[in-house]
Image (cartoon, rainbow, N blue to C red):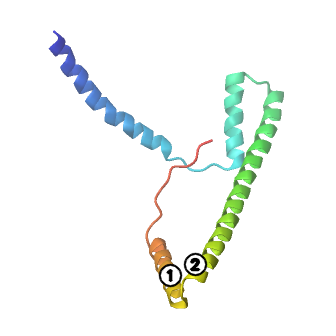
Amino acid sequence: MIRNLIIPIAALVLVAAPMYAQERTATRQRTPEDAATRAQRRTEHMRTTLQLTEDQVARVQAINLKHAEAVEAARAADKAQRDLERQELKASYDTDLKAVLTPEQYERLLEQRRKQTEKREERPAPERPAHQE
């Protein structure tokens, strides 16, 4: 009796697991949305779940748009700040190395960096899933 139940259950698990993995992969491949689209999507969701009146929908849309634009601006500012800090760190690192290495060694280091950059530019960038809020 137990044997008759174990085999079909095991077969069901083996068939269902790959199907679930395929569904998750498809949901991760989203295109990034702009602020207006995100605000509209949020507003529609709130309209249906909270049963908003038309007056509330207009006001919530304005609030959502304002918030989405602020978040987008903050992301851009954070990226700019990170890039600036990264450049400062690289300059400091290069100054420290230059004090230790001979001019020939430093030139070889710069040449290695140039080659690595060319190599990185030749290969295609990996596809990453879009960041979800």
Q: Disc count in the image?
A: 2
Furthest toward the top, the residue is: 1
Q: Residue at x 64, y 78 (%)?
A: 95
Does 89 sit above or below residue 4? below
Q: Nearer the viewer, residue 38 or 2?
A: 2
Name the residue carrying label 1: 109
Q: Secondary structure at mark 1?
A: helix
Q: Nearer the viewer, residue 18 or 110?
A: 110
Q: Which residue is mark 2?
A: 97
Quadrant including the N terminus: top left
How dense is the environment of label 2, judged by Cα within 10 Å: few (below 14), some, or many (20 and up)? some
Q: Where residue 84 sits: x, y (%)?
A: 70, 66
Instruction: Look at discs 2 and 1 and give the one toward the viewer.
Output: 2
First reached walking from the N terminus: tag 2 or tag 1: 2
Q: Residue at 47% of width from left, 75% of height from top?
A: 116
Where is residue 5 shown, x and y percent of the image? Answer: 21, 15
Identity of the residue drawn at 73% across and 47% down = 71
**124 on left or right of 46:** left
Q: Amino acid type of disc 2?
A: Leu
2 and 1 marks in contact (CB < 8 Å): yes
